[in-house]
Structures are given as structure tokens and as C-alpha cells.
Amino acid sequence: MTQEPDREIAKLKIAVEELSILNDLAITASTTLDVERMLDIIVRKSIKALKAEQGAIQLITEQNDVPLKTLIRQMDSENRLLNYKVGINITGWVLKYQKPLVIENLSKDERFQTTEQERKDIRSVLCVPIQFRAQLLGVLMVVNRKGGDIFSEEDQRLLCIIASQSGQLIHNMQMQQSELQKKKLEHELEMAGRIQWSLLPKEHPACQSFEISMCYEPAEIVAGDYYDYFILPDGKIGIVIADVSGHGTSAAMVMTLVKGVLCSVTTKYHSPSQVLTDVNHILSPIVPPHIFITMLFMELDEKQYRLRFSSAGHNPLVHYDFTRKTSTMIECKGLALGVREQVGYDSKELELHPGDFVLAYTDGITEVIDRHYEMFGEERLLQAVARGIQEKAEDVIGYIQKQTRLFIGFNTYQDDVAMIGIRVKE
């Protein structure tokens, strides 16, 4: 008669112990955001609950060369189990079949190849998968039940319960860490964006004969498009517009490098072609092989009403002739910067008259697409310039922006956009 109450009391004790373990894990998870500490606690709780000598937990990673991230903690043992190779075979078995594995006597288990030292150190093993909603996260293992006993079905059930709870906790913590990492990255990008904006000119150069306006719209927080102004000898004005291949962080880093190189090269200015040649000579050995930069460097001469320019694979200039009321593309061919070190560049010269307008731009304008995947293109840009001619250069830039936005509809710019407009005062 006394056996039934004793069994009920034993079951109750087991249930209380299980609830206590799960409660401890839940409390710990609420007080730490450190995955390593969480894993350590799971292992220690498992060792204590199953009266094992050692335990290990391994999480699946996305790294091909390191598929499992391992954390092992010892308790009441001085042997060298931390280095046993059989652990790889055991966890591999559990990962493959995704079910618990019980080894009563490793030395007699023919499924696993072991060394003499491993057979001496390891007796019994219990290993279970850690899952969250059918997603395999890793494995949880305990080794050598104290007293020489084997791990029972009740032990297996308990470790499976711990693994199930651990799966939820590990998933939640990974999501929290992912969110924290995302916020950190967003903050760093925001800071990088602020720094990049600070590197761009704050105002246009003062001109008596020309009016200069610009537009700059990065596709992301940071961008690979770049523009700048330089004071050249004899009162001439240097204007540069450039586009680093791609966009985002890597393009922005190269853009910053480009600015530094240009600031150095223009101190010994001779001509637009010389600027591109020198910049290319410096950049080619150091930019990554998959990166290239298109650039247009313009020399604006107020006294002579002339524009001299050179291009390194950049989009052609748009010139609106006020007298003829026509818009044309003026191309100056040249290899993009960073492709080959020894490159020479040509120059072209454009004579300007009152009312004329010149537009330099990046391909984010001409290559923007509408919902039918049709590009805005050069012809539409020429038409926009001709129809948008106003008294001020900024009005022309604004009209081009309006036309491209009407063209793409609900789409957004897929690439960085930069435009510089030069209007000859009447």
C-alpha cells in the first residue's frame, strides 16, 4: 500500500526539480544578454540535474569552416574530456538524425571510432538536439553519470526538456543580440553619413559670370557619388563630380579616399587631364580590383567664358545652347580610374555664352527605371534640360529632379544621384 504514495512523491519531486531548473533558466535569461553566459548556465544546470561529470553545448553557426560553436564546462572531474574527438562524431550523429542519443558504454559501442584514452575516460553519454520550432540550433550533451550508472530514460526525458526550454531561450537571445547589432550598425552608418556630408562643400564658389547649383541624393545613408570645388591658379574654379562603382559603405569609403587624393593633386594643378592622370596613378595600386571610379574634372574660366574638362569614363556633359535653343551631349572619352595605372587622358574645351547651361551628373539620373523597367535615359535628360531652362541654375536642377520623380512614380532611386548645373549669367 505504501508503494503507490512513494511513487507519487517521487514523481512530484521530479516535477518540482524540473520546474525549478526551467525557472532558473528563465530567470537567468531575463537578467543577461550574453549568449556565452547563457550557454554556460545551461551546461551547468544540465550537469547538476543529471548528476553528470561533464557537459557540453554546441550551437550551429553560418560559418562553413566552423559549423559549430562550442562551450564546454567541467564539474567534479580532472580528466581530459575537453579534447576528446568522439564528441564530434556524437554531435554529428545527433545533428544528422535530430533525435536523442544514449551511449551506455562507449568502449562497446561500434558506431563510433574511439582511441584507447577516450574509451578509458568516457563511459556513458547522453546527447540531445536543441531545436526551436523545428529549426535545429545545436546539441546538448552530458558525459559520465556519477557513480558509474548509465543515463536512464528519465534522464533522457529531463535533458530533452532542458534542451527544449534552452532552444526558446537561445532563439530569443539571438534575436535580441541581432536587434542590438542592427541598431549599432544603424548608428554607425548614421555617423558615417554625417561624416560624409561634412566632407562635401558647404557652399558653392562665388562667381560673377556663372551661377552654380547642385543636387545630391544618396540611395542609402552613405554614398559613392562625390562632388567638390577647388580654387585653381589665375582665379579659375575646379569642379569635380565622381561616381564610385556600387553604393553603400564600401563605395563611401573609397569616395573619402578620392577626396583626399584630389585635395593633394590639385595643389599642383596644371590641367584637367593632369588631375585625372595623377589621381589614377595614386588610386590604381590601392583600390580593390572590383572597384573603379568614373570622374569628370572641369576647369571654369570666368575671364574667358570657357569650360575645359576631362573625363575618366564618366557620363557626357549636357550643354544647352541658349542662342540655338538646343541641348546636346558632349563626350570626352577616357578609362575609369583604378582600372589600369598607366593611363593618359584627353581634354575638351567649350566656349560658353550668356544664357548657356552645362550639366554634369552621375548615372543615377539616366539609369533610374520606372515600373516597366525602362530607363530614364539620355534623351529624356536632354529634353528635361531644354524644357526646364529658367533664369537660375537651381531651377533647372529642380525641374530635372521633378521629371525623374514623375518618371519613376512610386519607385525610389536605385543608385546615388548627383548633379551640378552651371548657368552663364546674362
Image (cartoon, rainbow, N blue to C red):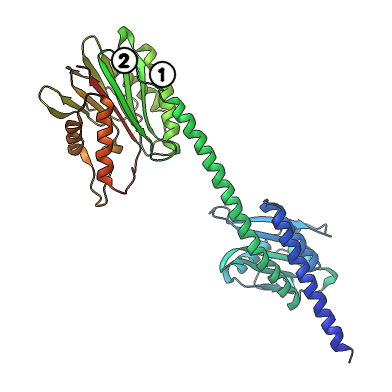
Between the C-alphas of marks 1 and 2, the distance is 14 Å
**Residue name at image x 24 percent, y 52 percent:** 372
Say above or below: 106 vs 4: above
Q: Amino acid at mark 1?
A: Cys
Furthest-top residue in this view: 234
Q: Quadrant of residue 145?
A: bottom right
**Residue name at image x 80 percent, y 72 percent:** 16
Q: Residues within 10 Å of mark 1 (few under 14, many from 20)?
A: few
Instruction: Give left or right: position of 170 versus 217.
Output: right
Say above or below: 188 vs 230: below
Mark 1 or 2, nearer chain start: 2
Say above or below: 286 vs 232: below
Residue 360 x/y as whole percent: 27, 28
Instruction: Give left or right: position of 297 versus 189.
Output: left
Between disc 1 and disc 2, the foreground one is 2
Instruction: Give left or right: position of 206 versus 123.
Output: left
- Secondary-structure class at tag 1: helix
Instruction: Give left or right: position of 218 versus 184.
Output: left
Q: Residues within 10 Å of mark 2 (few under 14, many from 20)?
A: some
Which quarter of the rendering shows the C terminus? Answer: top left
**Residue name at image x 71 percent, y 75 percent:** 157
Residue 355 x/y as whole percent: 18, 20
Task: Inspect this view and state whether residue 51 appears.
Answer: yes
Residue 283 x/y as whole percent: 39, 26
- Secondary-structure class at tag 2: strand
Q: Which mark is residue 392?
A: none
Q: Amino acid at mark 2?
A: Ile
Furthest-bottom residue in this view: 1
Q: Which mark is residue 263?
A: 1
Residue indicated by mark 2: 237
